[in-house]
Each structure stands twice: as C-alpha cells, then as structure tokens.
Image (cartoon, rainbow, N blue to C red):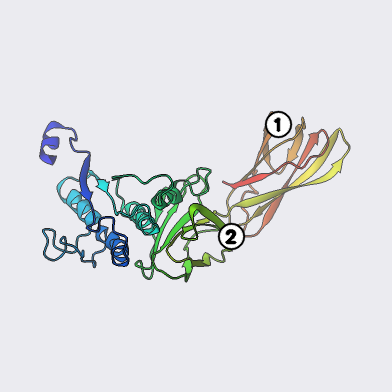
Amino acid sequence: MKDYSDAHGRRYLDYFDQHYYPQISGDKDPASDALRLRSTRSLWDPTYVDESWIGPSGVNAPPLQFIRTMKSWVAQYNPGTKTAITEYNWGALDDINGALAEADVLGIFGREGLDLATLWGEPKPTDPAAYAFRMYRDYDGAGSRFGDVSVSSSSADQGQLAVYAAQRSADKAVTVMVVNKTGGDLTSPLSVAGFDNAGAAQRFTYGPGNLGGIVRGSDLQVSNGHVDATYPANSITLLVLPAAGCSASLHVNGDWNTGHVATVTITNDRRTAMTGWRVNWTWPGDQQVTNSWNTTLTQNGATVVARDAGWNGSIGAGGSTTFGIEATGPAASPTLTCTPT
C-alpha cells in the first residue's frame, strides 16, 4: 500500500484498523471479573501474557501489546498511518466491573495514542459503562471533559490503581483519572510535577455507592503539587486540578455619586513568577472609565479590559501590583476576572 501511494503521489491508506475482543464474554462471576480487569493490559503491557488462546499457544505469541504492536508496524511499513480499533467490547457493560474495565480501556486508548476506537454494542444510558464514558466526556452534567493533551502518568501498581492524566487546553486544568480495580478502599498520594495548582482539586467519583450518578465529592487540598486521596473500592475517580493564575480585587477610594475613584490590586497566586496580566469586568450600570493609571485600559459598552503597562507585568510568586481608575457614576462592586498573559 505504501509503495502504491508513493508511486501515485497520494496516501491511499488513512487508518490501520483491527478489531479486539478479549476472551471473557459477558460473564460476571468473580473469576471473570478479575480476568476482565487484568486483560486490559494486553493492549499495552510488554510483561503481560494474555490468559486466553491468544497467549503462549496462540497465533499471536506473547506479549501481545496490541496497540503498541500496531504502531510499531505502522512505523516500519507505512509511517503516518493512523491506528484504529473499530470494534471492541470488554463485556459486562451493565455492571460496575464492566464500567471499571471501560474506564481503564479509554484511559489506555488516550495514553497510547490510538486515533480511533468504536465500542461495538453500546451500553444503555443508565448502564454503569455509560457512566465510564461520562467520567471522561461530561463528568459534571455541564459538558466538562477530561483533558485533550496527554500528560505522562504512572502508578506504582497499575493493576490496583490505574492512573491516566491529561491537560485541558481551554483552561489549562490538569485532569487525573484513577480507577480502583480492587475490592477495598485505597489511600494513595498523588504527585503532579511541574504544575502550578490553585490549591484545591475537585473530586468526582462513580462507584457502587451510587450507580445512578457521578458524585461530586469535597475538594482536596493540594500542596506543592501533592494531594492525598482515598479511592473507594471498585470505583472511578476524577481529580480536576485548576491551573493557578492570578486574582484581582477592587477597592473604592472615593465616591461622590456622579463619579468615583478606585484601586485594583492584582495578586499572583502561583508558586512562580508571572510575566503579564489582564483584568476584565462588566459594570452593572452605565459607569464609564474616564481616566486610568498603571494600566492599558479599554472599555466597550459595559465591558472593561485592563492590561499591564509593560513595566508592571512581572509579578513574583505571591506578589501583587495595583492600578487605578476614575469613572463616572456611582461606585460598584463588579466581579473581576484576572488572567496571566
């Protein structure tokens, strides 16, 4: 195929596609449940020998490393071809065990860089496996998603706590999916290297305690990139670590009803210096900024955007700077949003 494409000056093969069905069927006895959770390793693990006919006596001698083998063949025979598994199903989609396997498989697909995958025989909307998809695609019911830029992640024992991570381009939050494949609660420290976090991680969990919905748990404190959490037995937990940024507050220095003067303070909430900032807000009335200092400011309608003046853009970790405004109309307390630039 590559030779033909090269000879005709265009690519004729877009995807190298295979189907994959682990040899477990839909059985939900303890032995099948345990095998289902182990068998996901056949997609990637160079130390895992598949426990079915695919193993030592099968046509595909171990280790299978299904996705990695596909990619190695692409690299060798037709570089640039995308990889796909357009049929797969680990079974037990109506059971928490099937949901754990599906969450694990989706994490593996992302980490290993599979370009396309299709679950053959979709779960019902109320099935546990459907919630495995929601943990990645709509964990809060408002369309919030797992990150789209893969982040390297590892677990001391992927067979007990499977860990997958990605950063979300839209807001730079780091999302970490943790699948507890065991029958007991597990407490483990999590370390995120080189990431400036705002100080708390949001927690969302799906598990046997509530098979009808994803539970929003209490936030977890993050200190210097470390967070301790307990992961319930047979559960899927998503941690969302918002990126640290800056905050802004407005203090009114004087108000004479037809006008007012105020000072805005910008604080760097990061553990590292930032090189620039932008503050925006919307007036609740017809206030209009008539003068400003220590900032480059524009107003369009009720919307105000204030940027650093260049010389005051750099703020050290935990430091702050200020700018001032004079505006028409009575003083107000708009909500200020600060963004590092």
Residue 189 vertical position relative to residue 207 in the rendered view, above or below: below
Task: Please tell me which of labels 2 and 1 falls first in the chain.
Answer: 2
The answer to whether residue 319 is seen in the rendering is yes
Q: Nearer the viewer, mark 2 or mark 1?
A: 2
> How many C-alpha atoms fall within 10 Å of the one at disc 1: few (<14), some, or many (≥20)?
some
**Left or right of 94 in this view: 252:** right
Along the line of sight, the residue nearer the viewer: 310 or 214: 214
Up the image or down, 79 lies above or below 220; here it is: above
Q: Position of residue 141 (x, y in %)?
A: 52, 45
Is residue 200 among what the camera can see?
A: no
Task: Residue 208 in the image: state x and y as whole percent.
Answer: 46, 60
Which kind of residue does numbered mark 2 sit on? Asp
Name the spot of residue 196 as percent of width and height, x first. 54, 58
| Residue 276 rendering spot, x and y as whole percentages | 59, 48
Q: Which numbered dot is residue 250? A: none
Residue 48: which quarter of the image? bottom left
- Decide: marks 2, 1 in contact (CB < 8 A)? no
Q: Which residue is mark 2?
A: 219
Taking the spot 21% from the left edge, 48% from the top edge, the residue there is 19
Amino acid type assigned to the residue bearing label 1 in the image: Ala
Q: Is residue 14 left or right of residue 132?
A: left
Report the number of discs.
2
Q: Is residue 162 above or below residue 322?
A: below
Who's the residue at 28% across and 64% down the image? 35
Q: Relative to the observer, which residue lies in front, 8 or 115?
A: 115
Q: Quickly name the residue at label 1.
A: 302
